[in-house]
Amino acid sequence: MATEYEIKKQICEIGKRIYNRGMVASNDGNISVKLNDNEFLCTPTGVSKGFMTPEYICKVDAEGKVLQAYEGFKPSSEIKMHMRVYKERPDVMSVVHAHPVYATSFAIAGIPLTDPIMPEAVIALGCVPIAEYGTPSTEEIPDAVSKYLQYYDAVLLENHGALAFSDSLLNAYHKMESVEFYAQLLYQSKMLGGPKPLSEAQVQRLYEIRRQFGIKGKHPADLCPNAKQGKPSCHSCGGNCSCGGHADADDAALIAEITKKVLASLK
Ligand code: 13P
């Protein structure tokens, strides 16, 4: 079992990696680790995550209130977002927020990562939805992210960046790397004339492998509400299932019908 000081050093190491890989600019991004139900370590606000030492790291309670912080350091302004993940996902031990160029570009363009283009991304992530825009540091982002937490281990934050979480700091960081790599491949294959997606049968075989490996965490292969109802899941519905944050075809038809009736009643 790593000591608290060792975990602080690990957070600094991951901070260096996200900074050196260009996943954050300047003072962007934040990282947290759960020690137990009442104690969490987190990066401080307003510092470059590439140049932290263990003294920078703050300790907060489950409400995000400071338990310990060295003079001059305050917890991340996004601590509420981290705390919401821990509250709603007791299996999560670490949360990483970054602004990687490709993933953030998709978040800005409003395009979720849903094309099944390579086995590792299908197995590790399934697909990655976009949580609706919220003002940083307010409850808006935690509220927007909340509805995806039971289905995914990574989400894009609209016009903002990406959020990844897992059962360890290293795994949460790796999840962020996977999101960015997937986004980069998707972007570049679009430049080359568009990706040639895997077939539904190929996707199903990859889902099966994920199940056989017993990979932990949430994945739409098992949880997508559409898949549960026997409808196509994320990969084959192009992100139109409800867990992708968009109304599905049935909802769209219902909304159209209601709109028609409302308009007719106004005539
Ligand atoms: P903090 O430095 O307060 O963690 O904020 C950085 C950031 O990226 C906000 O989205």
Image: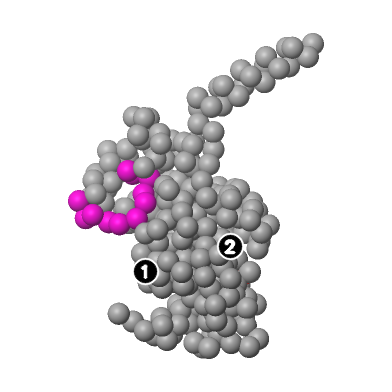
The percent coordinates of residue 190 (x first, y second) are 50, 50
Camera-side mark, 2 or 1: 2
Q: Is residue 162 visible?
A: no
Residue indicated by mark 2:
80
The percent coordinates of residue 139 (x first, y second) are 63, 56
- Kindly report the distance in space between the C-alpha atoms of the residues bearing marks 2 and 1: 19 Å
Residue at left 46%, top 36%?
241
Return the residue found at the far left: 212
The C terminus lies in quadrant: top right
Residue indicated by mark 1:
168
Q: Is residue 215 magenta?
A: yes
Residue at left 32%, top 39%?
199
Please tell me whether residue 137 is drawn above or below residue 150 in the rendered image.
Answer: below
In the image, what residue type sits under mark 1?
Answer: Ser
Residues at discs 2 and 1 in contact (Cβ within 8 Å): no
Q: Is residue 176 magenta?
A: no
Residue toward you, 267 or 119:
267
Q: Is residue 138 visible?
A: yes
The percent coordinates of residue 244 (x first, y second) are 49, 42
Residue toward you, 53 or 129:
53
Please tell me whether residue 136 is drawn above or below residue 16 in the rendered image.
Answer: above
Tell me the SS state at disc 1. Answer: loop
Q: Quadrant of residue 215?
A: bottom left
Bin the neighbour count of mark 2 within 10 Å (Cα to Cα): few under 14, some 14-19, many 20 and up: many
Tell me the SS state at disc 2. Answer: helix
Residue at left 45%, top 82%?
8
Residue stretch in magenta = 212-222
Residue toward you, 24 or 89:
89
Name the image colouring.
Answer: one colour
In the image, what residue type sits under mark 2?
Answer: Lys
Instruction: Give the total of numbered labels.
Output: 2
Q: Quadrant of residue 170?
A: bottom left
